Image: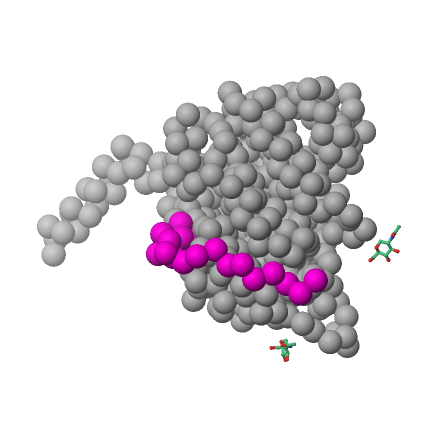
Amino acid sequence: MTVSVIIVVFWFFLAEILGVQSKATDVPGRTALDNFPLIDGHNDLPYKLKMIYNNQIEKYDFLKEWQENDEMKDCKSCHTDYVKLTKGKLGAQFWSAYIKCTNNTNPVSDTIEQIDLIKRLVDKYSGVLYWATKSDDIAEAFKQKKIASFIGVEGGHSIDNRLSVLRAYYELGVRYLTLTHFCNLDWADSTAADSTPDTPKKNLTEFGKIIIAEMNRLGMMVDLAHVSRNVMIDAIKASKAPVIFSHSSSRYIYDHVRNVNDDVLQLLKENDGIIMVNFFSGFIGGNNTIYDVINHINHIVEVIGVDHVGLGADYDGVHRLPKGLEDVSTYSDLFDLLKVLNPQIWTIENLEKLAGRNLVRVFRKVEQVKLQLKDEKPREDIINL
Ligand SMILES: *[C@@H]1O[C@H](CO)[C@@H](O)[C@H](O)[C@H]1NC(C)=O
Ligand SMILES: *[C@@H]1O[C@H](CO)[C@@H](O)[C@H](O)[C@H]1NC(C)=O
Ligand SMILES: CC(=O)N[C@H]1CO[C@H](CO)[C@@H](O)[C@@H]1O
């Protein structure tokens, strides 16, 4: 008894002298981002380059702060450049290939133009960006101190109702497809359906399920940001692989159709998928500060645990952001603050999960499902146009 008390007292004394304890608590949350790459699910810089530069990126300098690019200096919704990404400690990005879903007469060629733009951007800045198409590329890029750069296509309108186009996008490097943007499609409802409760719903049609089966076969992640609540549920049930929400937040914390209800989060957990939290003020609510985003993250962790959450801030795709998360330089502040506010939950190990370990697990599973399905033939069904 006395001996063990002495040992304990001695240990505390020793720990104090060696600074063991204070070290453990003093380590800032951002340390997690030195251990494991921070992966963001959604960034719309490519659309900015279309709008501001007409995709002519020879004039554009990604390595300068965006404010120093003459053409951008009046930009109200620019948040991304390499200097700020370095401060924020970003390790991997899904760059969005997005085109509008309304009044679009050339959805396929317009989308390919955005894919080509992302490829040219990665080529032009190959000293700091790393062209990535598989989960292992994330670790390789991190080793080389580059940002792994993936492509996600934001909206099923981009495939123009054709599985051939979906397959061709995979060949071009696309690794997720968001099933819809703001428009309802022939084969899936978007949040537009949830905003008009009295109109009939189609949810995810049989052709929509075929598209998901084809994505599972290809190894393309199914992204459920932007889809209606019913499509979230139908798609999770239809998918053989884990799904993602590339940029969505908690509907319990803020009741917006773009956010995800707790019961759907439960299905997501059973599916082993991930929700990557969006920072847009319009989806976050509260007092529009970094603390509100933390409320969303912590609520998701409370409901489904720490293995199914990530970040998909939506930088460059939104015009208002919470105080403290104004641009891509602030990710690292978020990791510091999470740990300070809630050191029990936000250990360095769990911060690494939030940063990227969860997404990598999902991505690997999607690649494993592809392997399991390697004997399946490409589906030839096309929608009745
Ligand atoms: C859409 O889903 C809802 C909720 O599950 C269901 O009540 C409705 O019948 C579905 N509509 C169609 C066309 O399947
Ligand atoms: C917003 O700020 C007020 C005043 O500081 C506080 O009482 C309230 O709890 C905050 N709301 C949220 C959602 O954090
Ligand atoms: C100019 C034009 O054709 N505008 C149309 C774009 O699409 C929306 C939604 O389908 C229509 O309401 C507009 O009239």
Q: Quadrant of residue 272?
A: bottom left
Compared with 119, 210 (above or below) is: below
Q: Quadrant of residue 70?
A: top right
Compared with 337, 69 (above or below) is: above
Q: Quadrant of residue 324?
A: top right
Which percent across, then down, holds residue 240?
43, 62
**272 left or right of 66?**
left
Which residue is at the front of the view, 161 or 327? 161
Which percent across, then down, holds residue 216?
46, 56
Quadrant where the C terminus is found in the figure: bottom right
Dominant secondary structure of the magenta stretch? loop
Residue at the image point whose x is 56% and y is 62% from the top: 381
Compared with 105, 82 (above or below) is: above
Which percent across, then down, holds residue 329?
59, 33
- Looking at the rendering, the stretch of residues picked out in magenta corresponds to 365-385
Which residue is at the front of the view, 39 or 299? 39
Residue 65 visible in the shown view: yes
**306 left or right of 75?**
left
Residue at the image point whose x is 63% and y is 24% from the top: 62
Residue 257 visible in the shown view: no
